[in-house]
Image: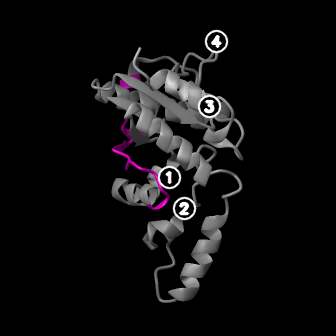
Amino acid sequence: MKVIFLDNDGVICLSNNWGGRTKKWAKYRSANPDSSKERKDAPVSVRFDDFDEKAVKILNEIIKETGCEIVVSSDWKLHATLEELGDYYESQGIIKRPIAVTTNLGQCTWYNDQVWVWSPRWDLEMTRVIEITQYLHDHPEVTHWVAVDDLNMGKNGEEWKNWGIDNFVLTPKSNEGIKQLSIKEKILKFLKDD
């Protein structure tokens, strides 16, 4: 099985889309004044910013070319169920629903024998690496995989960064994400058969 571990913000939900959820929430509350004041109770379409159409097009091309499955590694997994995320992905034009989300750090067990110096500077990155590695540990059927994120989780040849992962593609420009030049090719390198 081929898997793309997908972050949303800075990858397919780009910085020019950020803040849209605030407008959606205000409009929803105005139209539904008796509804719960908790965003988690609102429809999933109100809870999240929109995906970039061109970024979705590129993701769909990657899915078609490789047959990969999506596993959500984004912290959006904390704000919606897998079913709701699938509905949202479909509503945004993604041709496949995610099959899973990564396990939250508190439930991860594979790293207990690892010796890392935890760094507040790399907290989010280290957490996501552990969660992705837990998924891979629990799913040996995964033969090809890549993590795509705007957080730098790669080793990048840095010896001190022993917690990084090799099958990683960074999307450093939050306004371009997966659309950035050569990102698609880097992702395909990990997902294509040899």
Among numbered discs 1 and 4, the one appearing first in the sequence:
1
Q: Do the residues labelled 1 and 3 touch (CB within 8 Å)?
A: no
Question: Secondary structure under badge 1?
Answer: helix
Residue type at mark 4: give it: Gly
Residue type at mark 3: give it: Ile
Q: Name the residue under label 2.
A: 48
Residue type at mark 2: give it: Phe
Quadrant location, the N terminus: top left
Specify the quadrant of the image occupied by residue 19: bottom right
Which numbered marker is on residue 183?
3
Q: Mark 1 points at which residue?
A: 76
Q: Do the residues labelled 1 and 2 touch (CB within 8 Å)?
A: yes
Q: Name the residue under label 4.
A: 157
Among numbered discs 1 and 2, the one appearing first in the sequence:
2
Q: Residue at x 45, y 55 (%)?
A: 89
Among numbered discs 4 and 2, the one appearing first in the sequence:
2
In the rendered structure, the answer to whether residue 150 lies left or right of residue 96 reads right
Q: How far apart are marks 3 and 4 (CA)?
A: 19 Å
Residue 123, can we see it?
yes
> Picture coordinates of residue 116 (x, y %)?
54, 20
Range shown magenta: 91-111
Question: Secondary structure under badge 4?
Answer: loop
